[in-house]
Amino acid sequence: MQTNEVKGMFNATGANIYFESKGNGENILLLHAGIADSRMWDNEFHLLSEKYRVVRLDLPGFGLSDFTGGNYSYSNIINEILTHLDINHTHILAASFGGKIAIDFYLDHSEKCLSLALLSPALGGWQDSSFLQDYEEEEEKLLREGKIEETALFNYKTWILRNRSPELINTDVKQLVVDMQMEFLTKPESDYSCEEVETKDNILQIKNIQIPVLIINGKYDIQDFHDISELMSKELPYVKKIIIPDTAHLANLESPNHFFKLISEFFSDS
């Protein structure tokens, strides 16, 4: 069976973006979390491509993608890539920071979006809890001290391990998360001046999302993300919210079969 697999770099406004496309059928775009890169979707990318045309990418500054200077907008970058790939309509599967980008993209380009499957989505305008504020301060402190590996492990413990016993987490999951973190944290600083175009605090606009939305959280996810999902489940007109037991922030890595079943059913029905 022909898979139509394509890999390449796309020169978007403000960034060179690495992307991969595989499969045939309706389109699904995968957007990764801020502690990850496109490799977090390895399982979903290959399995979904048996039925769909699936596109995944590294956001600028992550994985194999880099900033090239000037003003940039995540939403515009996504739109440019979809146009480059001749994609007029797509489902979106997105995690955490990628979920925020997916929401922003829908509110900018609703005509291009068929459905949103959001894993622990972030949300523009959300006021971080004291826990997240303390986390950000500690991460910045470690980075200032040049403790790169310690930062990667700190992020793994904060977002994935949580307060659980280490032996409960598959060692492959830990290795992947730490590897993705190290790829991000050891990237050379851009030689160019880069500035994000200010986005709206779309927490006030989520009620305008008029397509099917699936929201998934791991049971042990950080409370902010449970609260965001609860808010969205009350505001959105077409939404389903599910919690996967025995998982944390990136539930797809810890419970891949359960997660894939949920998103497969959702995309088939959307």
Image (cartoon, grey):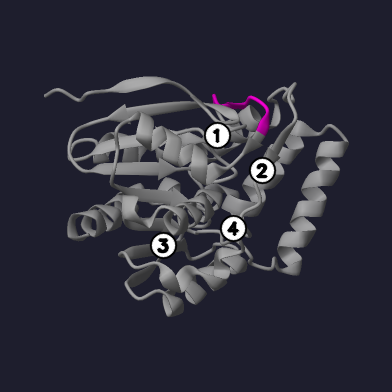
Disc 4 packing (10 Å; few <14; some 14–19; many ≥20) = some
Specify which label sits upstream in the sequence, 4 or 3.
4
Type of amino acid at the residue the image marks with label 1: Gln
Specify which label sits upstream in the sequence, 4 or 1.
4
Q: Quadrant of residue 67?
A: top right
Q: Viewer-nearest of labels 4 and 1?
A: 1
Contact between marks 1 and 2 (CB within 8 A): the answer is: no
Q: Considering the numbered disc 4 on the image, is that residue within a helix, a strand or a loop?
A: loop
Q: Considering the numbered disc 3 on the image, is that residue within a helix, a strand or a loop?
A: strand
Relative depth, front residue between 59 and 205: 205
Residue for point 29% across, 42% down:
88
User: In the rendered structure, does residue 95 fall within the stretch colored magenta?
Assistant: no
- Seen in the picture, residue 230 relative to 150 is either above or below; the reply is below
Q: Residue furthest left?
A: 1
Specify which label sits upstream in the sequence, 3 or 1.
1
Disc 3 packing (10 Å; few <14; some 14–19; many ≥20) = many
**What's the CA distance linking mark 2 and mark 4?**
36 Å
Type of amino acid at the residue the image marks with label 3: Ile
User: In the rendered structure, does residue 67 fall within the stretch colored magenta?
Assistant: yes
- Residue range corresponding to the magenta coloring: 64-70
Report which residue position mark 3 lands on. Answer: 216
Residue 94 visible to an observer of this rendering: yes
* Percent of width and height locating residue 186: 70, 26
Q: Considering the numbered disc 2 on the image, is that residue within a helix, a strand or a loop?
A: strand
Specify which label sits upstream in the sequence, 1 or 2.
1
- Seen in the picture, residue 170 relative to 268 is either above or below; the reply is above
Q: Viewer-nearest of labels 2 and 4?
A: 2
On residue 175, the disc is 1
Report which residue position mark 4 lands on. Answer: 164
On residue 196, the disc is 2
Q: Viewer-nearest of labels 3 and 1?
A: 3
